[in-house]
Image: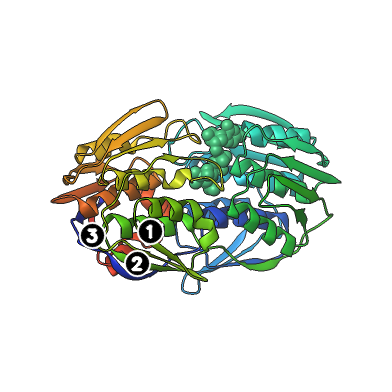
Amino acid sequence: MAKYVVRRSGVLKGDITASGSKNAVLPLMAASLLTKEKCRINDTPELRDVEVLCCILEDIGGKIHFDKEQKSLEIETPEITAEGAAPHLAGRMRASVLVLGPLLARTGKAVVALPGGCAIGARPIDLHLKGLEAMGARVKTFQRDGFDFVEACADELTGCEIYLDFPSVGATQNLIMAAALAKGTTLIRNAAEEPEIVDLANFLNKMGARVKGAGTDNVRIDGVKSLHGTEHTVIPDRIEAGTFMVAAAISGGDLTIHNTVASHLTPITAKLRECGVDVFEGEDFIRVDARGKSLKAVNIKTLPYPGFPTDMQAQFMALLAVAKGKGNVNETVFENRFMHIDELRKMGADITYADRKATIIGTQALHGARVKATDLRAGAALVLAGLVAEGTTEVSQIYYIERGYEKFVEKMQSIGADIEYVEE
Ligand code: UD1
């Protein structure tokens, strides 16, 4: 098993470039199933999740060419050769459910093994299924060979009005993709507003779809008969950028992060400023200067976009563990996203929690420990804590981190982090 060995590193400084967004590229890849023609996605990050989705798409009939030098991913699916995603692949990532909407829209049938991914709560897909049913799909779940599957069938999908009980990112994406080829108009109310939804809408519109209102809670999709191939550059990864921003702050460093969209990072910028750190927003870069600053505790409540992202909660908890004073963290998006707390405590963090609320009292005295990445962002948080802890921190289960951070070790080393990848 591989692990990261992290040692106290001093200030992190220099320039670093954020990769293309993991959470944006996965739906774009799924959307490529909506056409027989070739789609090219530029700035595709080289990540475990991208690899797994490539395998799922290949199983379904996709011909894939990933030029890793150029970061260009080409997907062409002239024929659909399977009904959906097999359990050994789908079970490895939550985003595998995103093939459901496009497959159903293109062929009238989709069978997908229920998705896996980071174990950060129950993560049901009821909102995806309710929306597809409202568009006329017959949906059932069943078991085969010990795995749970969902099957959706429809001779024709029909546009309709869908109200989401919660602005789910994945459900909004799945329903926009299905509606792109449905008959008539679909209105999604209380839709998710994340930048990744806007990127998907832009991609689909380049393919000939008619999606309006993406980025608001009200998305309108006028169905079209067919879609064509296109080329698109994926948006920068705001969570990776946010993680580097916290790396600068926690280490008292000075980092300029290139390939960023400042407006996507507003809650992170605001909270870091509240912590007492300087943040400068440029056209396509953001600079965090924490030199000589003492970090002050802040309160955080995770919310759907444009609120504070749940995907940055763990990293901020690492920051609060060494800030001055008491900070509260309220996790409202996922019910079970506090698994990093026990790991941070092993490093000396003073954290108490009940239900979805945690209280962190900052200490100067984190120490290295053997800890586990319990999910993707939790793993990043432990590395950040390791940068300022006395001694050596060993982070295991790093496959979670590699699901979503491109060349994490190399990038962290390039800004001065003492981190190495060790194969046991
Ligand atoms: C996406 C992101 C993930 C991020 C999350 C919230 C990808 C690949 N992943 O995940 O990194 O943390 O958005 O910003 O883009 N829910 C239901 N029923 C549903 C769907 C969701 O109850 O049918 C609940 C979930 O259990 C969770 C909440 O809604 O509590 C948010 O989930 P959702 O927005 O769907 O997140 P994902 O799309 O899975």
- Residue that label 2 marks: 255
Q: Earlier in the sequence, mark 1 or mark 3?
A: 1
Indicate which quadrant contains ligand 1: top right
Q: Residue at x 69, y 52 (%)?
A: 214
Q: Earlier in the sequence, mark 1 or mark 2?
A: 1
C-beta proximity under 8 Å, tags 1 and 2: yes
C-beta proximity under 8 Å, tags 1 and 3: no
Left or right, 165 with respect to 56, comes to right
Which numbered tag is attached to residue 245? 1
**Residue 342 image offset from top left, x and y in percent:** 27, 34
Q: Residue at x 50, y 70 (%)?
A: 284
Amino acid under label 2? Leu
Amino acid under label 3? Glu
Q: Residue at x 68, y 41 (%)?
A: 110
**Residue 314 image offset from top left, x and y in percent:** 37, 43
**Residue 29 image offset from top left, x and y in percent:** 60, 57
**Residue 281 image offset from top left, x and y in percent:** 47, 66
- Residue that label 3 marks: 420
Real-space CA distance between mark 1 and mark 3, rounded to the nearest whole angstrom? 20 Å
Can see residue 295?
yes
Amino acid under label 1? Met
Q: Earlier in the sequence, mark 2 or mark 3?
A: 2
Real-space CA distance between mark 2 and mark 3, rounded to the nearest whole angstrom? 20 Å
The outermost residue toward the bottom is 70
Query: Residue 420, relative to residue 340: is it above or below?
Result: below
Query: Residue 74, relative to residue 342: is it above or below?
Result: below
